Image (cartoon, rainbow, N blue to C red):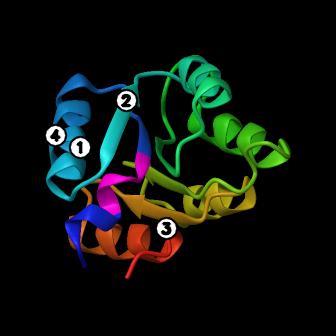
């Protein structure tokens, strides 16, 4: 894949743990993406209304609207339902994976993230070569 294919793609990272947020931003930028990040669900929803990203990487356990609610609201809106959402969580139980898929997530990964798998899924969802 050509790095310039990714540079034009905007990722919204929604993660409330500062250390993970910084780590994910660094990873995503190294992978060639433009990244905007927020730490809560309400801010994420407000930002998406102003600047629609190409993909949302969404922690499920965040304050001010949890990730399940944010995902459902984005998928209910005609303006944002097309945005791919990758749900991430430290919650390993299959019920949480199913809940994420039920609210509209396109993929679900358990923390700590396997970045090779996340990158492959992002390429598919963003239709990158």
Say which of 19 and 50 sits in front.
Answer: 50
Looking at marks 4 and 3 on the same chain, the residue that comes earlier in the sequence is marked by: 4
Residue at numbered disc 4: 23
- Rounded to the nearest angstrom, the CA distance separating label 4 from label 2 is 12 Å
Q: Residue 37 carries which label?
A: 2
Residue 23 placed where, x, y %? 16, 40
Query: Quick check: 107 above or below 47?
Result: below
| Circles 4, 3 touching at the beta carbon (< 8 Å) | no
114 with respect to 61 (left or right) = left
Residue 122 placed where, x, y %? 41, 67
- Rounded to the nearest angstrom, the CA distance separating label 1 from label 2 is 9 Å
In the image, the segment drawn in magenta is: 6-10
Query: Quick check: 35 above or below 75?
Result: above
Residue 86 placed where, x, y %? 50, 57
| Circles 1, 4 touching at the beta carbon (< 8 Å) | yes
Q: Nearer the viewer, mark 3 or mark 1?
A: 3
Q: Residue 126 carries which label?
A: 3
Q: Can residue 17 be seen in this view?
A: yes
Q: Mark 1 Cα within 10 Å, few/some/many (few <14, many 20+)?
A: some
Looking at marks 3 and 2 on the same chain, the residue that comes earlier in the sequence is marked by: 2
Q: Residue 42 carries which label?
A: none
Q: Can residue 114 be seen in this view?
A: no
Residue at numbered disc 1: 24
- Rounded to the nearest angstrom, the CA distance separating label 1 from label 4 is 4 Å
Q: Mark 4 Cα within 10 Å, few/some/many (few <14, many 20+)?
A: few
Q: Which of marks 4 and 3 is in front?
A: 3
Q: Quadrant of the N terminus?
A: bottom left
Queried whether the magenta region covers residue 49, the answer comes back as no
Looking at marks 4 and 2 on the same chain, the residue that comes earlier in the sequence is marked by: 4
């Amino acid at each position: 894949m050509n790095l310039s294919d990714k540079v034009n793609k905007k990722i919204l990272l929604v993660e409330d743990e500062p250390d993970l947020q910084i780590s994910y931003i660094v990873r995503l930028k190294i992978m060639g993406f433009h990244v905007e990040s927020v730490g809560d669900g309400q801010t994420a929803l407000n930002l998406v209304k102003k600047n629609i990203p190409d993909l949302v990487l969404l922690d499920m356990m965040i304050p001010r609207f949890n990730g399940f609610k944010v995902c459902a609201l984005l998928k209910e809106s005609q303006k944002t339902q097309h945005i791919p959402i990758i749900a991430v969580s430290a919650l390993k139980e299959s019920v949480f994976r199913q809940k994420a898929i039920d609210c509209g997530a396109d993929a679900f990964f358990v923390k700590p993230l396997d970045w090779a798998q996340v990158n492959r899924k992002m390429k598919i969802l963003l239709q990158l070569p």
